[in-house]
Image (cartoon, rainbow, N blue to C red):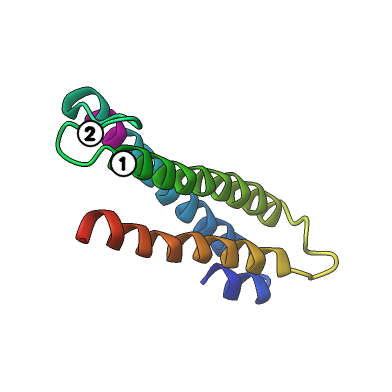
Amino acid sequence: MAVNFAYRRERRPCGLLMLATAALGATFVGLQAFEWTTLIVHEGVRPWGNPMGAAQFGSTFFMITGFHGFHVTCGVIYLLTIASKVVRGHYEPGGNYQVVEIAGLYWHFVDLVWVFIFALFYLW
C-alpha cells in the first residue's frame, strides 16, 4: 500500500505505512531476542550444544535466525530512512518514488525467507 500511495504522491500515508512496517519489524527482532534469551538462559541451548537433542541444532538455529534477524534490522533501518525522506518531500521534485518500491521488494524478500525458516524450525 505504501508503494501505491508513493506513486500517487500521497506522502503522509506512504510514510505512515512505512513507519508501521518498520515498527512491526522492530517488534519481530525484539521477540527474536526474547526467544534467544529464553533458549540460552532457561533451556541451555548454545551454538555448540543442545541439551534437548542434536548438538547441530544450536549452531544451525542461531546462525540462520541470527542472519535473518540481521537482515530484518537492516530492513527496519532502511524503511525508516526512506520513510523520513518521503515525509520530508525529498522525492517530490522529480516524482521518482522507485526507492519506495525497492524498499518494499527487499522487505518482501526478507518476509518470504521467514516463511521457509519458520517452516524449517517451528513446524517441522
Specify the farthest residue to the left.
Answer: 52
Of 103 and 116, the residue lying toward us: 116
| Residue labelled with disc 1 | 56
Determine the residue located farthest toward the right in the rendered image: 94
Indicate the amino acid at tag 1: Gln
In the rendered image, is residue 26 in sight? no
Q: Picture coordinates of residue 52 (x, y %)?
A: 14, 37
Which range is magenta? 34-39
Image position, residue 38 (x, y; %): 22, 30
Nearer the observer, 88 or 46: 46
What residue is pinned by disc 2? 50
Q: Which numbered disc flags the more N-terminal residue, 2 or 1?
A: 2
Q: Residues within 10 Å of mark 2 (few under 14, many from 20)?
A: some
Q: Is residue 46 left or right of residue 84?
A: left
Within 10 Å of disc 1 (Cα), the crowding (few <14, some 14-19, many 20+) is few
Q: Is residue 104 visible?
A: yes
Q: Residue at x 34, y 40 (%)?
A: 32
Which quadrant of the figure has residue 103?
Answer: bottom right
The x, y position of residue 4, in whole percent, is 58, 76
Residue type at mark 2 is: Asn
**Secondary structure, magenta segment, majority class:** helix
Left or right of 28 on screen, residue 105: right
**Which residue occupies the foreground of this view, 6 or 42?**
42
The answer to whether mark 2 and mark 1 are in CB contact below 8 A is yes
Classify 13 as above or below 37. below
Residue plotted at (45% across, 54% down) = 20
Point out residue 101 in the picture as x, y percentages from the top left corner. 64, 69
Q: Please identify the quarter of the rendering in which residue 27 is found.
A: top left
Is-magenta flag for residue 28?
no
In this rendering, the answer to whether 94 lies above or below 86 is below
Q: Secondary structure at mark 1?
A: helix
Q: Is residue 7 left or right of residue 29?
A: right
